[in-house]
Amino acid sequence: MSLLKVEGLTTAFKTSRGEITAIEDVSFTLGEREILGIVGESGSGKSVTALTIMGLLPNPPARVASGEVRFDGKVLTRLSDTRMQKVRGSGIAMVFQEPMTSLNPVFTIGEQLMETLRAHERLSPRAQRERAVEILTRVGIPSAAQRLGDYPHQLSGGQRQRVMIAIALSCRPRLLIADEPTTALDVTIQAQILDLLMDLRDEFGMAIMIITHNMGVIAQTADRVLVMYAGRIVEEAPIEALFERPTHPYTRGLLECVPSLDQDRARLAAIPGTLPDPARRPRGCRYAPRCALRIEACTTAIPPLLGIEAEHAAACIRAIPA
Amino acid sequence: MTRLVLRRFASALPILLMVSLITFALMRLVPGDPSAVIAGLSATPEQIAAIRADLGLDQPWPVQLWRWYAGLLHGDLGRSLLLGQPVVEATFLRLPVTLALSAYALVITLLFGLIAGIIAALRQNSWVDQAAMLAAMLGISVPSFWLGLLMILLFAVNLHWLPTGGYIAFTDDPLGWLRTSTMPAISLALLQAGLLARITRSTMLEVLRQDYIRTARAKGLPRHLVIFKHALTNALIPITTVIGITVSLLISASVVTETLFSIPGIGQLLTQAVLNRDYPMVQGGLLIVTALLVLVNLIVDIGYALLDPRVRYDTA
């Protein structure tokens, strides 16, 4: 039984130019203790997918146009906001991209951690404090007991992200969604935070959904990967298959963009063109305008996600099953 | 925090000096002579000249200024030419009236301004929002003296619910104070409440878009904590500045309101003093009011530091 099951999820936004779909027909599952990577460019719909699962998009303008999200036997997309509050933080927790702005500047980190505990569990003030110190120590904040009274501006970016992770883990969620958790951090801190997330997965037995545009982060952490482009999943594969046999031309393009030490190239590779405007997406395959393998048929219908090998699927009519 | 307070007190000195210079110069630049007022209509030029000499007004300006400052340094603000009372005494007799009225108006401002602003922000673009903002715009645009007159006509002249004017001290009769102060306080507060509502709305909207609000929601906090704890505490930081300005504006606006409702406050006192060219009263009274406003701003700055830990540490 999967922990999270997303089926045919479409999220639409009202805009001055009419309703625009940010993600379309997104379906995937996530098992217990699994790390699922979602990769794609900015604007591909990764974050909207995560925020829809969390029920954090403002409605209006956003609404779930079709599909559903099932988590732990509950259909989240049908829960009232009050009942969704109970899921947020304790069932599914989330860590965001910007550690500098994700913590409230006017409250101490201890308060921001303990108020999460208070929202979901009945604990004495002393027990809250103990749990806060314990979890802060676990995520690598030195002398945590003394840091409870610190304000966010007194911490570095890496430390703030550790605090964010501590807050997310404080009520032992079964799923952690990490939306670009390391993008704003420098490279050494990045590696430390990713290691921490992997360790915590083993220790807490939770599943992780990690959203990134960085193939290196995916390679380091994920068990399975979804590649998103212009609001749709274009390829889904276990990590080895994705790196060894990337099938969708977009995935291949992304992998070619990753610089490597043994490449003797003066310039970094890049996929020509840009993401289509969500209001004026091409009729057929969204990637067709930028695709080197494009044929006539690509521009007539959206290609469905079809299996290529076990657990490996791609939405491309030029993909030849192995 | 102590350093913040000390620094603000130090910066108050040049402000007080400037205000004293400006009022001194302005009073002497406008035509008119207190001696003529004191002497009365039937006085001969010789009598007026004698009074001028008696008051020291025949001296050159620098000498007059020097004498005034010398008195100030001794804690002596002089005597009112008209009332014959010491300026300090006259001012402190009237000040509680104005302060009580301003405090009442401030309470109305905060109550309506904050609540309307918060509700409008939470229901952005709904009819509630539009109605609140229309009311706020109306409050800002309607001149307070005109509104005061309308209220007098309706509640005092036609309905006889409230007196047309006059004043009863709170310490004498709280209910009487409420009856005499409510209309003046409302007419004072309306403009300020409208401004505060608009600023509260835009500040709340700005804060509600912040990442930490999303974090608070992602943690599963109930809505009232997200709004009143996480959003409002941050929104109050800029709003506090506005409240500080509001207090200053309320005190200066009392000049018109007190005259309209015949309330014996500092506004009425100073209006009379200006009209009669009561130099020491105007100079001294304004200096005391300025010192009061500096104090209000200091309190605002302390409020700032209490609300925002970043300010607290920067000035520690």
Image (cartoon, helix red, strand yellow):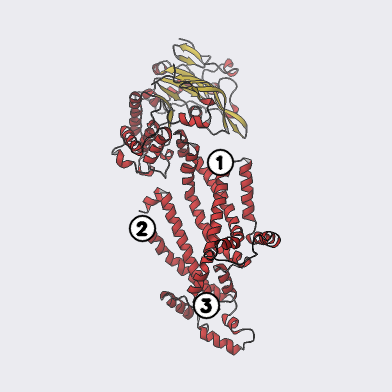
Q: Amino acid at mark 2?
A: Thr
Secondary element at image label 1: helix
* Residue A86 at x, y percent in the picture: 46, 30
- Label whose residue precedes the other's in the sequence (1 or 3): 3
Q: Which residue is mark 3?
A: B80
Give the x, y percent position of residue A294. Answer: 54, 18
Pick the residue in front: A248 or A164: A164
Instruction: Using the image, determine if residue B305 lies above or below residue A314.
Output: below
In this view, the residue farthest toward the right is B158
**Alpha carbon distance from label 1 to label 2:** 38 Å
Q: Mark 1: few, some, or many residues within 10 Å (few <14, many ≥20)?
A: some
Q: Secondary structure at mark 3?
A: loop
| Residue beneath the point at 38% across and 31% down | A169
Residue pictured at 57% horizontal, 44% vertical: B119
Does any portion of residue B21 appear in the rendered image?
A: no
Are discs 1 and 3 less than 8 Å apart at CB? no
Say whether disc 1 or disc 2 marks the residue closer to the N-terminus.
2
Q: Which residue is mark 1?
A: B122
